[in-house]
Amino acid sequence: MKLGDGDPQLSSTPKPLLEVNGIPIIRRIIDKLNSDNISVAIVINPDDEEVFKRKLNGLKFQFYYQNFPKGTADALYAARQFISDDIFGVFMGDDIFNYDELNFKNISEPTIFVYQHFDCRNFGKIGLDSKGYVRKIFEKENVGKGLINTGIYVMPKKFFQIFQKIGVNHISNEYYLTDAISELYKTGYKMRTRIIGMWKGINFPIDLAYANGIYSIKPIIRLARADDFASLIRILRQLKPESINEHYDFAMGTGILQKIIDDENYYLLVAELNKEIVGTATMLIQKNLTHNGRPYAHIENVVTASEYRKRGIGKVLLSELIKVAKSLGCYKVILNSSLENSRFYEGIGFNLTNEIEMRLVFT
């Protein structure tokens, strides 16, 4: 797999060998596995062997070969002679994640590592059964927020027995690991999920730029997590100091945040810059009896930390929410604004209406 957008280096280099801060992506993964005394196999195209040897000099691993690009499941099957344990780890060599967060050696059952994302359209969305096992992975067909597949697995050896049952994708003529998950489920080998807090697939040049910190002035936009609570309160207090005062019930607040995170109709986004939460915005998806029941979106609590304002962070947050609203089929997006901020929202595409907000407040 190679990545290219007019850059000769990107187009000619296998993605796992692209460098982040001077180190090939896959080298970071293998180095961690070596330090944990975990045996490593790499499946590559034979034509790339010499460049892999050169870039991974000094590390311990074995090569296996996939002569033609026939999919992720086929690549794993090519290394079947390497596997002796009942369960084993699978990594994509071109993704960025925090290896230490996996706690990999302490997992004793089949597991898929997942990441919470606010827009699943370009990813494999995890479908769970009533007991929390992975029933199916929906490849780039589900909109809205949810858990996405990172391509990091603890797989059962049973995979090699059911490989022949995996159907080939008729468009790409490839065999996918995501289809293997469904087949394993049918045979009783059910996989748990484990959420990780940091993951980035490298698919476009801008992804590599993020990983290298080239665009450190541009924030990462993601769904809020429970451990963001303190940062969110700090920023929201700047927007509504009267609502978050010294009498605010923080214990109750953490519970409210978790309910919002769990609600499929709420999108609470944060902007993260250099591991600091610098902005937030919330969108609620609602329905009514008009417009044939089509949903609409209501955006509120758009705020950037005072020290990071006028950097376009609010615009980036709103742009991502608008994209999600469109993908969900919303017929409109509404928000309330003061007159002094109306020009900011007009610059993003919002228009003033003839409606007047009227409010009844209960204290």
Image (spheres, grey):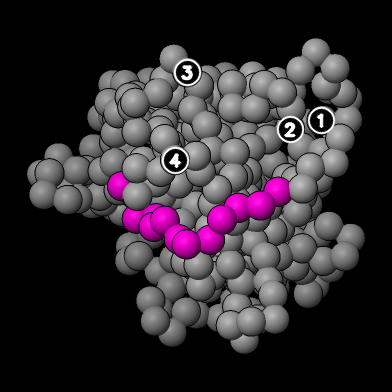
Disc 2 and disc 4: Cα gap in Å?
33 Å
Q: Quickly name the residue at label 1.
A: 254
For the image, the number of numbered tags is: 4
Q: Is residue 317 visible?
A: no
Is residue 357 covered in magenta? Answer: yes
Disc 4 and disc 3: Cα gap in Å?
19 Å
Residues drawn in magenta: 347-359
Circles 1 and 2: CB atoms closer than 8 Å: yes
**Amino acid on which the number 2 mark rests in the picture:** Ala
Q: Mark 4: which secondary structure? A: helix
Q: Nearer the viewer, mark 1 or mark 2?
A: 1
Q: Mark 2: which secondary structure? A: helix
Q: Earlier in the sequence, mark 1 or mark 3?
A: 1
Residue 296, quarter of picture: bottom right
Q: Quickly name the residue at label 4.
A: 339
Circles 4 and 3: CB atoms closer than 8 Å: no
Q: Nearer the viewer, mark 4 or mark 3?
A: 4
Q: Is residue 233 above or below residue 164?
A: above
Please name the residue shown 41% across and 20% down the image.
308
Q: 101 and 107: which one is in front?
A: 101
Circles 1 and 3: CB atoms closer than 8 Å: no
